[in-house]
Amino acid sequence: MELYSGGSFRRLAAFGEISMIDWDGKASALVFVSGCPWRCPWCHNSSLFKIADTEKVSDLMKYLSKKQKWIDGLVITGGEPLFKDDILVLLKEIKRAGFRIKLDTNGSNPKLLKKILDLDLVDYIAMDIKSALREKDYDRATGVKACLKSVMESIEVLSSYPRHSYEFRTTLIEGIAEEDEVLYNVDILPSGSLWALQSFRGENAASESMRSLPPISKNRLEALAQKLKDKGFKLRY
């Protein structure tokens, strides 16, 4: 197996949970990797901000070999899987074992995203759109400065691939990603794309101040979804 220059993967944080909702109804094994360049104050996986080498890839592969008959694929999430190019090692190992892969990403590493797609190492991409695609909004949503350029490049990368191979995903959050922020993006994201909406729940938010934020109501979410449908997007919520 061709490896990246570092030769190994040491960011495997957790695995073992089976989900029916993280990949469009498929039975998926969730694999969490650590490390992320952003510090979103509303992140529910802030324990994975820093790199932690908790689990062994060999143990993951043994686990998957026992579950192969019962799962449709894997969801690689985090943290940010594309934080470092060592993710190539893990993806190649999983692919070699015959599993389908959905990859979650925040769009912070467009060059690595393109490489992964060109190497055909994943079957589906879910990219987060955190807020309005304006620098001040993204700085606030991600807790870091000047990250928007990479996000825009990642959108461009995905737009050159078939629509069925990716989706955009937005968590609706009071003060960060409300209706106005989402609608701002309709002329930027590729029309006809799938856009998944979900409402923020703050119990495990990285910032204590955000844990008491109320979720966006179902009625507001449905009204926004209809507006996006009218603009030509496919919706899941």
Image: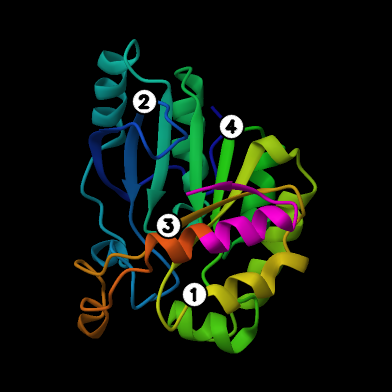
Q: Which residue occupies 25% across, 14% down?
A: 66
Q: What residue is shown with label 2?
A: 27
Earlier sequence position, callout 3 versus callout 4: 4
Classify mark 4: helix, strand or loop: loop
Toward the viewer: 142 or 236? 236
Toward the viewer: 194 or 113? 194
Label 3 and label 4: CA atoms lie apart by: 22 Å
Residue 212 numbered mark, or none:
none
Q: Nearer the viewer, mark 2 or mark 1?
A: 1
Residue 198 numbered mark, or none:
3
Toward the viewer: 215 or 42? 215
Earlier sequence position, callout 4 versus callout 2: 2
Label 2 and label 1: CA atoms lie apart by: 29 Å
Q: Nearer the viewer, mark 4 or mark 1?
A: 1
- 62 vs 217, left or right, is left
Marks 3 and 2 in Cβ contact (< 8 Å) = no
Label 3 and label 2: CA atoms lie apart by: 20 Å
- 106 vs 135, left or right, is left
Residue 218 falls in image quadrant: bottom left
Toward the viewer: 50 or 215? 215
Classify mark 1: helix, strand or loop: loop
Residue 177 numbered mark, or none:
1
Earlier sequence position, callout 4 versus callout 1: 4
Neighbor class of circle 2 (other Cα within 10 Å; few <14, some 14-19, many 20+) is some
Q: What residue is shown with label 4?
A: 123
User: Disc 3 marks which amino acid?
Assistant: Gln
User: Disc 1 marks which amino acid?
Assistant: Ala
- Horizontal and vertical percent position of residue 230: 72, 56
Q: Which residues are magenta?
A: 223-237
